[in-house]
Amino acid sequence: MRCLPVVMPLLFVAVPAPAQTAQGDVAVTIYNNDIALVQDARTLTVPAGRSRQEFPDVSAQIRPETASLSGAGIAIVEQNFDYDLLSPDKLMEKAVGQTITIVRTNPATGAETREQARVLAANGGIVLQIGERIEVLRDDGLPVRVVFDKVPDNLRARPTLSVTIDAAKAGPVATRLSYLTPGMGWTSDYVMLFDEKTGAADMQGWVTLTNNSGTTYANARTLLVAGNVGGGRNRLGALTATLEAAGTESGQRERLGDYYLYPLAERTTIAQAQQKQVSFLDVKGAPARKAYEFVNGWLSGNDTPRSAATAIKFSTSRQGGLGDQLPAGTIRVYMRDQRGDPQFIGESRIDHTPMGSSLSIRTGEAFDVKVKTVVEERTRLSSRRWQTRMRYILSNARPEPVTVDVAQNGLWGDARVTAQSLEGNRVSADRIEWKVPVPANGTTELTATFDTRY
């Protein structure tokens, strides 16, 4: 059973209304983690002494405890946030126990009849008392409407913050309303066009603004803050790129403490329930190369060969790289096919990345490059030490040679590499890496012996 659509009142009861001011000169600072700072400059015309001022068009998700109003010669006495929004269902709910007017239209003659009805309930349907009878108002297709004589005081057409102020004198006052709101955020998205033949990549970065706060911010000055600021919800991605080396270069972008600021060049309207994209990075021909990576998580073998991961490696340095710091986001990689058309080959997420960093973007699994790990021998040396001899068999079905970056993890404690057929690089206490060349349409093997404690 559904409530009937209701119409706005034919006649309203006059009620003294507080002063209202429309949304003014708005500045919005948006963070990565679903939170934004709104600063709204409005000019109020106030009487001397106490008065109630209403601020419509604030965020429907405003955190009222963070709101502050500043202006010369005014003091705040009380503030309230009214978020019970006007709707047909809400009107009927507020009318329970009150008298309304039911207007019925004769479909044949068009004549209208009016009856006074007392609303008994509005829970899953409208129950009315009309005279001595009880009637359920049903949506059965007949022309019926409900007329209210006023809008309840606590229903608002728009989210509204009301503030009781005490003004030293009457007249116009320039004020600034500031508050925090969830429901707004931004992410970075990157499009990379990789050219394997030239070893270069074009990279374009997009900022995607999302507004689900319940309010539109018209012609707003917009500032984006890159960094994980406390107090919000951070987005997590399923795939994460590898930061091979953190950069140490300083960029020219403005900072706020430990965060970078990305102001939009022009004012923009951030509409409710809207995503907006703005370009902030456009680099052509940055050096990049394709690589194959394989990681063995522990000193264990696998029965069947596994695919190596395909990765694109590049730098964000000023010299020989993108020349910028990269806010966290997703990089989507494309390559041109033989017809020259760009085709999508994979994507990966990056964390906030300083300038001068080295990145490895994994795009997927290699079709033709496989690695099989074999435990050739595991010998107990003492009550707490073991010796393990590993063999890594690499195969390549491509018509050109490749190099696979093979990594062995799990070397905790005082683990040692006592023998290896190819010199590796101990990059951390629990990881060693080798660069293993594999011939075209061929195989190669790598062996290593580890002395470990368990």
Image (cartoon, rainbow, N blue to C red):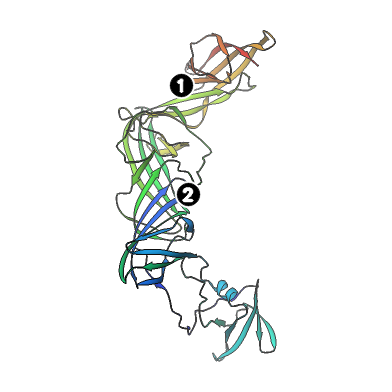
In the image, what residue type sits under mark 1?
Pro
Task: Say which of 193 and 21 sits in front.
Answer: 21
Check residue 34 in the rendering and tell me which mark sits there, or answer none.
2
Which secondary structure, mark 1?
A: loop
In space, the residues marked 1 and 2 are separated at their CA atoms by: 48 Å
Q: Is residue 45 among what the camera can see?
A: yes
Which secondary structure, mark 2?
A: loop
Q: Position of residue 349 (x, y in %)?
A: 47, 37
| Above or below for 153 versus 23 | below
Check residue 399 in the rendering and tell me which mark sits there, or answer none.
1
The quarter of the rendered structure image containing the N terminus is: bottom right
Q: Is residue 63 among what the camera can see?
A: no
In the image, what residue type sits under mark 2?
Asp
Q: Position of residue 254 (x, y in %)?
A: 32, 41
Relative to 333, 110 lies left or right: right
Q: Position of residue 219 (x, y in %)?
A: 33, 59
The quarter of the rendered structure image containing the C terminus is: top right
Relative to 288, 142 lies left or right: right
Relative to 123, 194 lies left or right: left
Q: Position of residue 207 (x, y in %)?
A: 39, 46
| Above or below for 362 versus 56 | above
Which mark is in front, 1 or 2? 2
User: Mark 2 and mark 1 in contact (Cβ < 8 Å)?
Assistant: no
| Above or below for 356 versus 102 | above
Instruction: Please tell me in which quadrant of the rendered image residue 452 appears.
Output: top right
Relative to 419, 330 lies left or right: left
Earlier along the polypeptide chain: callout 1 or callout 2? 2
Check residue 359 in the rendering and tell me which mark sits there, or answer none.
none
Task: Say which of 268 and 364 sits in front.
Answer: 268
Instruction: Please tell me in which quadrant of the rendered image residue 299 appears.
Output: top right
Q: Residues within 10 Å of mark 1 (few under 14, many from 20)?
A: few
Task: Say which of 384 and 379 sits in front.
Answer: 384
